[in-house]
Amino acid sequence: MSTANVTAMSRKLSDQEAVDDGIRHIQDLVFVRDLLAVRGASRAELRDCDEVIDGVRRRLAESAKRASARFATAA
């Protein structure tokens, strides 16, 4: 196995880890949002949470696109 292949595999794993981390982050944010809702948070507070969740989702989508593009070019 060449050094180039090892480097490419390392990048793929790091991209996948970033995507996995993003998914876990969104899950945590949704859990906190639901907890706040149960505890009587205002609509404005819940809307703020939704905006943060949407931002993380957008970043996750971009990470997933980058990761998939690297998989496509490495094949």
Image (cartoon, helix red, strand yellow):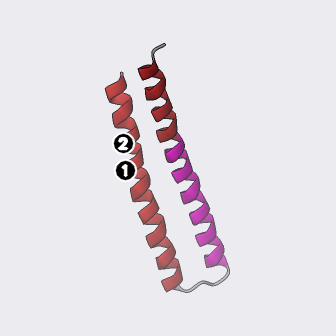
Label total for image = 2
**Nearer to me, 22 or 34:** 22
Q: Residue at x 46, y 20 (%)?
A: 3
* 29 up-or-down from 36: above or below: above
User: Circle 1 sits in a helix, a strand or a loop, which is it?
Assistant: helix
**Nearer to me, 67 or 14:** 14
Residue bearing the label numbered 1: 62
* 19 up-or-down from 54: above or below: above
Pointer 2 local density, CA inside 10 Å: few below 14, some 14–19, many at least 20: some
Main SS category, magenta section = helix
Kind of residue at badge 1 = Glu
Q: Quadrant of residue 73?
A: top left
Residues in magenta, as a range = 17-38
Pointer 1 local density, CA inside 10 Å: few below 14, some 14–19, many at least 20: few
Residue bearing the label numbered 2: 66
**Looking at the picture, how far across and down is residue 62, in whole percent?**
37, 50
Q: CA distance from mark 2 to mark 1?
A: 6 Å
